[in-house]
Image (cartoon, rainbow, N blue to C red):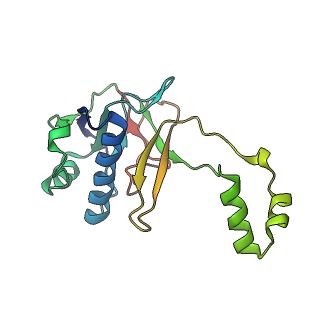
Amino acid sequence: MTTHYIDLIVVPDPESGTPQLLGALYDRLHLALVQQRLDSIGVSFPGYSMSPRSLGTKLRLHGSDASLRQLFGAEWLKGMRDHVRMTDIAPVPADAPHRTVRRKQFKTNVDRLRRRRMKRKGETAEQAREAIPYNVERTPNLPYLHIHSRSTAQPFCLFIALGPTGPTAVPGNFNRYGLGGPATVPWF
């Protein structure tokens, strides 16, 4: 249950901007969640904004007091300490609404979709062009993080979508990115 939280605030410097540092911080969090096999830690971005499209400077981690202490028992922030300010673990405000924070995936690159179709269906480039026209391309308009996959080491954009707020928590597990399907986190 997400009864407690801790804030990690990114402090940019002249060499690294906030989005790059937030992505690096999130990469380290993902690795820590994988290594510790934690599915009880959820994330939120209190500075989330659609206009301008931004996740802000703060990464909030939600969980029980024990699970947050377990996460921070490991030195996963090593190398980031100069760029991150951390609050103490604190209880969630009793009147906080709850919402889902999840990943939104887009099939956006027409050329990639065509190559994938050619490989999977054994089609020629011409057949793939006929099957997948340019107008299927979608431009995502959500805030995102640049991170790296732990399984493939490939960089990718992790788009973050918010669900509607509700008065009560929905319990559940979070994935190794700290994102939930039906599970909610307090939003304050």
Q: Would residue 38 appear left or right of 53 to someone viewing this image?
A: left
- In this rendering, the count of numbered labels is 0
User: Which residue is at 44% across, 67% downward?
Assistant: 152
Please tell me whether residue 81 is drawn above or below residue 11 in the rendered image: below
Based on the displayed image, in which of its 4 quarters is residue 185 positioned? top left
Q: At 57% across and 50% down in the image, what residue appears?
A: 105
What is the x, y in percent for residue 158?
A: 47, 48
Front residue (pair 172, 155): 155
Q: Residue 90 or 153: which is nearer the viewer?
A: 153
Q: Is residue 31 visible?
A: yes
Residue nearer the viewer, 25 or 6: 25
Q: Position of residue 139 (x, y in %)?
A: 64, 39
- Extreme-bottom residue of the structure: 122
Q: Nearer the viewer, residue 40 or 86?
A: 86
Taking the image as drawn, is residue 172 in sight?
no
Left-right relation of 122 to 181: right
Residue 78 sits above or below residue 151 on the image: above
User: Residue 131: x, y in percent?
Assistant: 84, 60
Task: Kindly identify the residue that appears in the image at 60 percent across and 39 percent down.
Answer: 140
- Residue under the point 35% across and 45% down: 23
Splitting the image into 4 quarters, where does residue 14 fall? top left
Q: Is residue 134 left or right of residue 88?
A: right
Quarter of image, res 71 = bottom left
In the picture, which quadrant includes the C terminus?
top left
